Image (cartoon, rainbow, N blue to C red):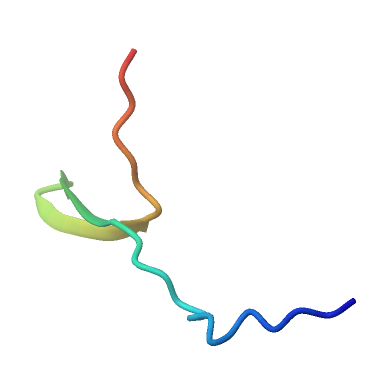
């Protein structure tokens, strides 16, 4: 039996983090997706 689920968004909100570092005296950045906070 098929059920209609209605409209489902293909893109859901994801936390994006911008990570930066100095490599050989030059700034270097990367965008990291799907980040979460972990408690140890």
Which image quarter: residue 30? bottom left
Picture residue at 84% right of the left edge, 80% below the top: 2
Q: Which one is in front, 30 or 39?
A: 39
Q: Which image quadrant: the N terminus?
A: bottom right
**Residue with the most extreme right position:** 1
Looking at the image, residue 21 sits to the left or right of residue 30; the answer is left
x, y percent for residue 10: 52, 80
Horizontal side, residue 17 vs residue 40: left or right: left
**x%, y% of residue 20?**
17, 50
37 up-or-down from 1: above or below: above
Image mark count: 0
Quarter where residue 5 is shown:
bottom right
Q: Residue pushed farthest top? A: 40
Q: Nearer the viewer, residue 18 or 5?
A: 5
Q: Which residue shows up at 58% across the image and 85% down it?
A: 6
Depicted 30 relative to depicted 36: above or below:
below
Residue visible at 76% across and 79% down in the picture: 3
**Residue 17 image point, x, y percent:** 24, 54
**7 or 30: nearer the eye?**
7
Which quadrant does the C terminus fall into? Answer: top left
Q: Position of residue 18 (x, y in %)?
A: 20, 56
Foreground residue, 30 or 32?
32
């Amino acid at each position: 039996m098929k059920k209609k689920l209605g409209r489902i968004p293909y893109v859901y909100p994801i936390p994006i983090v911008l990570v930066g570092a100095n490599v050989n005296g030059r700034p270097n950045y990367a965008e990291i997706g799907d980040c979460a906070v972990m408690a140890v």
